[in-house]
Amino acid sequence: MSTWKKVARAKQVERTTRLHQDLTLDDKSEYGTAHSADLEYLQANAAQIVQHIQNSDSGWTAERVMIAYVRQAVRAQEATNCLTEVMFGDALGEARRLDRDFAASRRIKGPLHGVPVSLKDLFKVKDYDYSVGFTRYCGDPSNEDGELASQIRAAGGIPFVKTNVPQTMLSFECANPVFGRTVNPWCSKYSSGGSSGGEAALLACDGSALGFGSDIGGSLRIPTAYCGIYSIKPGHSRASIQGSREVVAGFEGIRLCTGPMGRSVDDVELACRVIFGQSTKLDIWLPPLPYKDVEIPNQLKFGYYRSDALVRSSPAVQRAVQETVDALRKQGHKCVEFVIPDFIESLRIFLGLISADKFKMLFSHLDSDPKDASLLLPTIAPHVPGFLRHFVAWTARTLMKDPIMSRLTLNLRGRNVHEFVKLTAARDAYCRLFVKEVWDTYAFDGIICPVQSMPSVPHGASTHVGVLCAATSLYNIVDCPVGIVPVTHVDERKDALTGAWEAGSDKGSPFIYSKLYEGKKPYYNAAAMHGLPVAVQVVGRHWEDEKVIKMMRVVDDALGERGFGPGSYTTSSLSKA
């Protein structure tokens, strides 16, 4: 057996052991049956958990809440393979200490008192690995809590698991050689998204009360949408990223940001109140801008679009945007359709920045680990000789009639310092263009738009259509805060491809369009996708993160009850049992 396989096998055995050594699904001696007794706790959002404990409501203690989420996390792991580090023993001990302190003082520790919190694997937690799926980092636990874990503990929250990521964290699927593949909790044939895919799958299964991920091109938003939960990608300077495993440390072409993931807008708001502008350690880059309460007008003005210039959105995604717009208009808000200026330029800049070193630093962590198939494009494209790259671009433009792929093909290459600086200047110029032609021209309060042209993708699809990240990477380029709100589920009748839909002229890239909608096995299949969640992005202006959360609430309330939120997955599972 090769070295990497031995390391991966040992790590998986460690995880399995920890899953069951402190509490098993058969433990009924003190806490009742696994499903029915836990449901009350799984149906509560984070703020409600704290309130119940603070009120000393019958049966509500930090330990009892933790027991419920530990058991559900085990079920989530069995269903989706979402966990990496299992910290049940330490978490239960911490919960008992909180209960003893509360019994003595009758005061909660902070706004997250007793809340079970999950973390994407890149965040440091004392005494646990943060391997992010690389065998070279297995067996090398952190000797301290990172910034985020420290903030959570200071607020009374209890980290109890860490969650899976894709290899290199540069993919919107979720698989690596150490922990394997995380699947979508609503349909195992589809991806949970990435790179915060394990986190999204766990929360969607009610396996955690609150979670945290990171985002550099859609890594919070895509898995949140695929799995039907809520999140916000803040502006990069609102929360600390210190104390995490950065696979391209020092890269500032696009800034990595930390953000919360939860099962309600309330969860997102509570988490942002805890982490915005806060630093328990030295973080000289974080502006001291804590969460601020804001007021919004009774009538908001939203811009919206159903597709972008890369490729036409699927019927399910277009319906989600339209249903959101219709619901907002019914509540008296103004919604105006518009077109993103030079959308492909934002993707050109994004791809150029992330590939500037030919992904040398990204792949430096691999050692003998086999590369995931989703990394095919970044492995090959930057190393193609210039004459061959130009030939491929010419072929795409003239023979395939695909000027979009031709333009992008020329851009995936290494760059010297002079070229990289020119590209960062192009990023800043595009940001100014976006402000002028969108925010200033239309005076929008917010934007409603697709998270991606697909509700999710089948496993392996990102190998060919990785550029679908363009819908989210746009808002990393312009650094706007973005919330995610689940809207509906794919309906095999409403969302099937029709002649009228196919007759449209706005197909975008012929290559991407053909992969999504044409051939014997197109990636979009409404019948196979039936029941998958579909979400929208709620975008705000720079530094208006709190307003975005307010607008998320407006959207959520306008859409009404639709099968999302705390306990929805567990209740659905029980009804099917």
Image (cartoon, grey):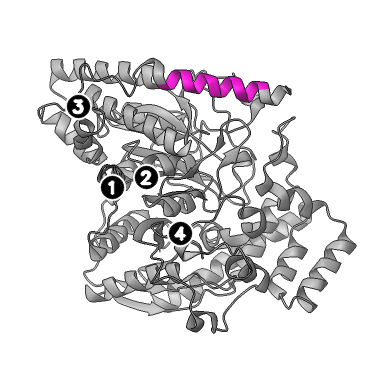
User: Which mark, by number, is residue 529?
Assistant: 4
Of residues 530 and 121, the one drawn nearer to the viewer in this rendering: 530
Gap between marks 1 and 2, in whole Å?
12 Å
Q: In this view of the protein, can residue 526 be seen by the observer?
A: yes
User: Which marked residue is nearer to the observer: mark 4 or mark 2?
Assistant: 4
Gap between marks 1 and 3, in whole Å?
33 Å
User: Which mark, by number, is residue 267?
Assistant: none
Gap between marks 1 and 4, in whole Å?
17 Å
Q: Main secondary structure of the magenta part?
A: helix
Q: In this view of the protein, can residue 138 be seen by the observer?
A: no
Q: State which tag comes first along the sequence, 1 or 4.
A: 4
* Callout 2 secondary element: helix
Q: Is residue 94 above or below residue 497?
A: above
Residue 385 rendering spot, x and y as whole percentages: 88, 57
- Asked if the stretch drawn in magenta spans residue 406, the answer is no
Other-residue count near label 4 (Cα within 10 Å), few / some / many at <14 / 14–19 / ≥20: many
Q: Is residue 562 above or below residue 339?
A: above
Other-residue count near label 2 (Cα within 10 Å), few / some / many at <14 / 14–19 / ≥20: many
* Callout 4 secondary element: helix
- Asked if the stretch drawn in magenta spans residue 13, the answer is yes
Q: Quadrant of the N terminus?
A: top right
Q: Is residue 233 above or below residue 442?
A: above
Residue 339 rendering spot, x and y as whole percentages: 50, 77
The residue to which callout 3 is attached is: 108
